Image (spheres, rainbow, N blue to C red):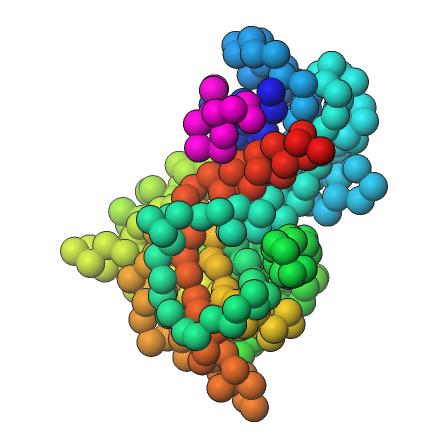
Amino acid sequence: MLLAGDIGGTKTNLAIFSPDAGLRAPLAEATFPSGRYATLEALAQDFLKDNRFPVTHASFGIAGPVVAGRVKTTNLPWEIDATHLASSLNLASVSLLNDLEAIALAVPILQPTELHTLHPGRPAVQGTLAVIAPGTGLGEAFLVHDGARYRAYASEGGHTDFGPTNALETDLLRYLEKRFGHVSYERVCSGRGLPNIYAFLKDSGYAAEPSWLTEQLATADDTAPIIVSAALNTEVPCDLCTATLKIFVSVLAAEAGNLALKVVATGGVYLGGGIPPRILPLLEGVQFFQAFHRKGRLTDLLTHVPVHVMLNPKLALLGAANHGLESMRF
């Protein structure tokens, strides 16, 4: 049996799978707050104590660059070694995947109900697929068809230099440079980035912060969901939150277009992570596609690229399990 996991900066999803039951029928599943554990080993042991199945292998999607079976997590103080983890958990093998590689591995097996198509485009047969996922951080990956199947490749594209596309975003870059020095796309286009955009607009005097919002933000551990909810609330409009989300959408679209060009994603672009499914009305608007397509001489290429939002919230878990079960067959 296989222990599979999606190890995120905020939460960790674990599940146990068997080859007979398959990917869509985990034998046990649970979600843990990642920050409450000192190590992945301790977290996994808690889960296995409560679910005593004869697990022999494990496969984890982890937010961070995996090199030679080791990873230092990006948004957690964990250093994970596959060999050490296998020994500690008494398993025959442990596979470590970048979390976006795991998400990408789920793309070819997604069901139609797990996708929301923003733009059908004209996908090329066996064309390269791009994946961009704003959640706690910003992940990017791609899939290339080798003639028999799609193979997934991780990247750390979310940590590349943020490139503003208008005067307001240029001012945002300068504001964030003073705070962070290096400003990546993740500093803007992620759950961690939303409060940065909000702070910039507030500090620049774009609009006044409502008193009710001040109270909510003051007591929140994570302000991003509050900002998103306020921006989508048409009954009690908040100019600061609405403007924050507009910038977020513009940056996400521009970087999704950048990624599509870098890997020539003629098969389509897939938006993952926890944020896109929550803001579908904004992603369906003109602003998103103006920013996505605005690529000078390559604009026409991007008009043919399909764009989808992945709705399944456990894509990395599904992809990690897919990888693990495939590995166990050989």
Q: Residue at x 47, y 19 (%)?
A: 28
Q: Tell which of 13 and 125 is nearer to you.
A: 125
Placement of 53 over or under 318, stated as above or below: above
Q: Tell which of 322 and 5 is nearer to you.
A: 322
Classify residue 81 by image quadrant.
top right
Q: Is residue 229 visible from the viewing direction of this image?
A: yes
Classify residue 64 by image quadrant.
top right
Q: Residue at x 55, y 89 (%)?
A: 296
Where does residue 95 sit, x and y in percent of width and height?
Answer: 71, 34
Q: Is 45 in the magenta?
A: no
Placement of 187 over or under 1, stated as above or below: below
Predominant SS of the magenta segment = loop
Q: Which residues are magenta?
A: 18-28
Q: Is 22 in the magenta?
A: yes
Q: Residue at x 53, y 79 (%)?
A: 165
State left or right for residue 112 relative to residue 10.
left
Q: Residue at x 63, y 48 (%)?
A: 101
Placement of 236 over or under 46, stated as above or below: below
Where does residue 103 sit, x and y in percent of width and height?
Answer: 55, 47
State left or right for residue 280 relative to residue 235.
right
In the rendered image, the residue lying farthest to the bottom is: 297
Where does residue 84 sit, x and y in percent of width and height?
Answer: 80, 24
Q: Is residue 199 visible from the viewing direction of this image?
A: no
